[in-house]
Amino acid sequence: MKLSKMLISTLREVPAEAEIVSHKLMLRSGMMRKMASGIYNFMPLGIRVIKKIENIVRDEMEAAGSQEFLASAILPAELWQESGRWEVFGPEMFKLKDRNEREFCLGPTHEEVFTDIARNEIKSYRQLPLNLFQIQTKYRDERRPRFGVMRSREFIMKDAYSFDRDFDGLDISYNKMNEAYVNIFKRCGLNSKCVEADSGAMGGAGSAEFMIKSEVGEDEVVYCNNCKYAANMEKAPAIAQKEKSEELKEIAKVKTPHAKTIEELVAFFNTTASKFAKTLIYKADDKVIAVMVRGDREVNETKVINTIGGVLSFEMADGETVKRATSAEIGFAGPVNLKADMLLVDNEVASMTNLIAGANETDFHYDNLNYGRDFEGVVGDFRKVVEGDKCPKCGGSLTVARGIEVGHIFKLGTKYSIAMGANFIDENGSQKPLVMGCYGIGINRTMAAIIEQHHDDNGIVWPLAVAPYQVIVVPVAVKDEEQMKVAEQLYNELKSIGVEVLMDDRDERAGVKFKDADLIGIPMRVTVGKKINEGKVEFKLRSSSETEVIEIASVVERIKKEFENNELKL
Ligand code: ATP
Ligand code: MG
């Protein structure tokens, strides 16, 4: 491709709306353009990267025995009503009506569709196991679309669904997908980590997420410094630290004017935050739920939701609800005389002695409260893990880092097959529900994650396997006939052996061309300049600062070597 003919415009300025590197670079390099909030158009360069990632995914899915499929993106409401998710999905679902008032949605995911296909097409155990995948556009009206295609409202997902006769079969299918994912992300040049994930209150027999370690990730990931344990923060169990036991003291009501926050209370009582228990008030549908954690801890809302079970909405209670539950101004909530439908007490709080908590009375706190003697509730693990907590597997020390979720594998079990009547006949002639798994990868989020891991101050540094073009030939002076002749020859020769090559034939200064080549991240650059008089050109890897001066005749070999170094075929 000749750059002079290509629809591309690079931007020198950083677009104001972009906060993270990948978003900035995708706009600056002209990979994509925004059309509306969370909705983007991919430009010729960008779509080539998308296709590269899709093909790696396709290749590994097929190698793992999955068959490609393509379902519609417009889905009838009835399917979702059958599974019960038409309401549960909430405002994230784009709903629409046809001219006859029949309801549809733009598919945010496809479990229902594939369960429907399975119940129509799978009759017998002889057809099992079966694994189907598609690469298709999904629609989610995200509450906060942001970071470009990291969290957009329209995005491409590879989603796969496995069907087995039993849970042992599901384990095999799931492990195959796990391996395929490891290969996919490795081939994309990503350093990924598979972490245990929450299977949600909806049930499910296990799930894992593929995370890319990154400061801009929206997920928190917990790692063990000693063993291989890794989990999403939502899932990671917190092991209660053993308190040194003290003698139980008599409960005391203390006037604490103007001391509401933990910081103010720490100063007032002249002690540490770990002596306090805070009581947070939530609303789960129409129920008031109170959760107690130590003063220096945070509530893990996923654990709370999973404990309550079956809630549609869950949020911090509004001021009025808090006042009603505590009969006090905000800032004095505690476990004694609290008007809540449920009090959840974190393990750690239940094992504290003589703790300080709100008294449910404006300007008052209780000192020396003790679980069992002064208050009771549902005791369990309700807090977030913190740095230094004990690993649940080996007792080692845990670290918390941020990650980008690029893929998710999930053992669905029989949740959808039972709800929607997707059965098969086993070898004894009896009818059984299909045992299912589902497996997603965000294609455009993967593209953004690659940029997060592969860039420098000058732009993107594409790994060869996903680069939009592999080589860029840059004639320094397009008015110089000799230079253009050599450049054209190299360009044609490379094309003829299957290298994806760009030629920057624009009449621009060399500096401008180099800047653009760096910004768009082409892995190899061949600069054709004055040295052609000595039969030489410059060869430079985008990932290296060194320039090699090589014979024109050895350019092809040098490029072939780079393919070998990257274990790629030409
Ligand atoms: P998140 O927690 O980030 O919202 P999710 O759990 O909703 O993700 P899944 O339903 O498991 O995501 O979807 C599978 C994959 O699709 C995710 O791992 C992610 O790579 C991608 N994905 C999900 N939502 C978006 C989005 N809004 N924009 C881009 N990619 C997305
Ligand atoms: Mg989501």
Image: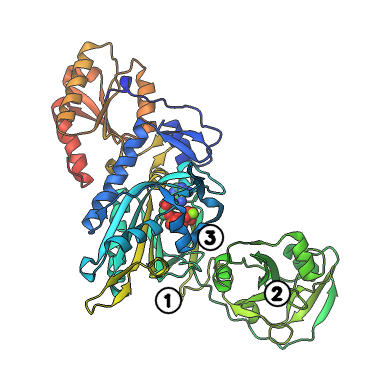
Residue 549 visible to an observer of this rendering: yes
Mark 1 crowdedness (10 Å alpha carbons): few <14, some 14-19, many ≥20: few
Looking at the rendered structure, the secondary structure element under dot 1 is loop
Give the residue at mark 2.
275
The quarter of the picture where residue 444 lies is: top left
Q: Position of residue 340 (x, y in %)?
A: 72, 73
Q: Position of residue 86 (x, y in %)?
A: 50, 57
Quadrant in the picture for the C terminus: top left
Give the residue at mark 3.
88
Between residue 261 and residue 279, name the one nearer to us.
279
Q: Position of residue 40 (x, y in %)?
A: 46, 37
At x 49%, y 52%, the residue is 217
Earlier residue among tags 1 and 3: 3
Q: How far apart, in angstroms, are the residues tagged by discs 1 and 3?
A: 38 Å
Amino acid found under the numbered disc labelled 2:
Lys
Q: Position of residue 153 (x, y in %)?
A: 49, 44
In this rendering, position of residue 291 left or right of residue 563: right
Looking at the rendered structure, the secondary structure element under dot 3 is helix
Q: How is the image coloured?
A: rainbow
Between residue 8 and residue 460, name the one nearer to us.
8
Looking at the rendered structure, the secondary structure element under dot 2 is helix
Earlier residue among tags 1 and 2: 2
Amino acid found under the numbered disc labelled 3:
Val
In this rendering, position of residue 133 left or right of residue 32: left
Q: Is residue 441 above or below residue 155?
A: below
Between residue 223 and residue 237, name the one nearer to us.
237
At x 78%, y 78%, the residue is 337
Earlier residue among tags 2 and 3: 3
Q: How far apart, in angstroms, are the residues tagged by discs 2 and 3?
A: 40 Å
The disc placed on residue 394 is 1
